[in-house]
Image (cartoon, rainbow, N blue to C red):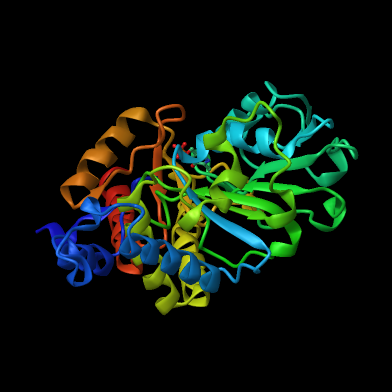
């Protein structure tokens, strides 16, 4: 039955059953308004309440200080690759970009259209980690420093970011695929953004959390719809029509995560990822993950099966038959990738582990 399907998609991905159920219950008639959230005006009191509660619960869950604005925007994280330089640059159009995977690279490519970008590290041959800070080139006069905290495709996550060494830089971070999986020390960041479709909700909304003093200084050429200040100053934080349904769904999940507790979520993320890494590492190279141990992602775990394409195809088809779906690696890298976001239960990871053991026995 459907209950036994475990979805390892990298995003959009699984959401907690409780959250989907709640949306189902409220689908036709939200809180006795007689209408669905899909039918509501974004200027209605009901929808304004949804946005306000979503922001309030997110602020509590992630302990976001009052001097940071929460914006719930459209256009995905990819739109932020342009919005960030538009909003943060002024006469100083110098930027630092640290690229440790394809998302950071996409952000870097868009930034180059706006000014002078310092590549903090030399282009890597393989995305398996990041060289030591002593090898970085950082422009001390740049307006900001951009990096991606968790590279979704390669499974490379910062677990030891050199904050202290960069304390004079304005840090801007793409946390699309690990947002809400561990606490954030806000003092260290000017802006954090995350496409919702991993830990937070369905596709459609990108969460941008930006420090107040950075608003209103955008370049004259900034399109209004990308101008953070326009969104922040508009009633209900809605400059134009937002993705109402996605915001509502993200809100339900944020409330759910708040009830569960970030500590518990973080603990589970460690447990689930170490279950897989420990087994991969003990499999005598039957299964391999190429990422430097300290940079291994707790969210996305790419691995190969004997580095053999045919065996991997068999792995994927047999896994799917057992209800373990969406395990195919990103089209650019191949192999297998298990994305184990917040909504993936420990039992799902255990089932994958049992399958990996069985597959290895049957296909030595
Ligand atoms: N950054 C990261 C880390 C991502 O994983 C993704 C999407 N997988 C993006 C940015 C791009 O997000 P979107 O598709 O919402 O533009």
Quadrant of the drawing holding the N terminus? bottom left
Query: Considering only vertical position in the picture, is 95 above or below 194?
Result: above
Question: Image point 39% across, 46% down: which residue?
Answer: 242
- Percent coordinates x, y for residue 299 in the rendering: 48, 54
- Percent coordinates x, y for residue 230 in the rendering: 57, 44
Question: Image point 50% across, 60% down: which residue?
Answer: 278
Residue at the farthest top position: 113
Q: Is residue 192 left or right of residue 28?
A: right
Q: Answer whether residue 61 is visible to the viewer in this image.
A: yes
- Percent coordinates x, y for residue 357 in the rendering: 33, 55
Q: How many marks?
A: 0
Q: Locate residue 67: give its quadrant.
A: bottom right
Q: Answer whether residue 130 is visible to the viewer in this image.
A: no
Question: Image point 51% across, 40% down: which residue?
Answer: 77
Quadrant of the drawing holding the C terminus? top left
* Camera-nearest residue between 150 and 350: 150
* Camera-nearest residue between 310 and 198: 198
Q: Locate residue 85: give its quadrant.
A: top right
Q: Is residue 329 left or right of residue 323?
A: right
* Camera-nearest residue between 314 and 20: 20
Question: Image point 46% across, 39% down: which residue?
Answer: 76
Residue at the farthest left position: 1
* Camera-nearest residue between 44 and 203: 44
Query: Considering only vertical position in the picture, is 91 above or below 235?
Result: above
- Percent coordinates x, y for residue 202 in the rendering: 34, 50
Query: Considering only vertical position in the picture, is 352 above or below 75?
Result: below
């Amino acid at each position: 039955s459907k209950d036994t399907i475990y979805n390892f998609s990298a995003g959009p991905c699984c959401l907690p059953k409780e959250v989907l159920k709640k949306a189902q219950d409220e689908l036709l008639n939200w809180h006795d308004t007689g209408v669905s959230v899909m039918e509501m005006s974004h200027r209605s009191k009901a929808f304004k309440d949804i946005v306000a509660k979503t922001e309030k619960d997110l602020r509590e869950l992630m302990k976001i200080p009052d001097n940071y604005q929460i914006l719930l925007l459209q256009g995905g994280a990819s739109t932020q690759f342009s919005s960030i330089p538009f909003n943060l640059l002024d006469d100083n159009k110098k930027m630092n970009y640290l690229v440790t995977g394809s998302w950071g690279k996409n952000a870097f490519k868009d930034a180059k259209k706006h000014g002078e970008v310092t590549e903090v590290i030399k282009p890597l041959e393989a995305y398996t980690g990041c060289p030591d800070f002593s090898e970085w080139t950082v422009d001390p006069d740049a307006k900001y420093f951009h990096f991606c905290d968790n590279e979704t495709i390669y499974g490379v996550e910062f677990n030891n970011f050199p904050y202290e060494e960069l304390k004079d830089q304005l840090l801007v971070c793409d946390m699309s695929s690990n947002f809400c999986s561990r606490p954030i020390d806000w003092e260290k960041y000017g802006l954090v953004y995350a496409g919702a479709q991993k830990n937070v909700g369905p596709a459609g909304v990108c969460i941008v959390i930006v420090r107040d003093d950075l608003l209103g200084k955008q370049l004259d050429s900034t399109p209004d719809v990308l101008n953070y200040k326009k969104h922040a100053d508009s009633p209900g934080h809605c400059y134009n029509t937002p993705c109402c349904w996605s915001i509502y769904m993200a809100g339900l999940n944020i409330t759910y995560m708040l009830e569960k507790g970030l500590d518990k979520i973080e603990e589970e993320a460690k447990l689930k990822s170490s279950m897989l890494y420990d087994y991969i590492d003990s499999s005598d190279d039957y299964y391999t993950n190429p990422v430097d141990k300290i940079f291994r992602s707790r969210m996305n775990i790419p691995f190969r099966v004997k580095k053999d394409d045919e065996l991997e195809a068999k792995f994927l088809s047999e896994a799917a038959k057992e209800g373990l779906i969406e395990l195919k690696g990103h089209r650019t890298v191949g192999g297998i990738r298990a994305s184990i976001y917040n909504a993936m239960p420990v039992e799902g990871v255990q089932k994958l582990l049992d399958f990996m053991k069985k597959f290895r026995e049957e296909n030595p």
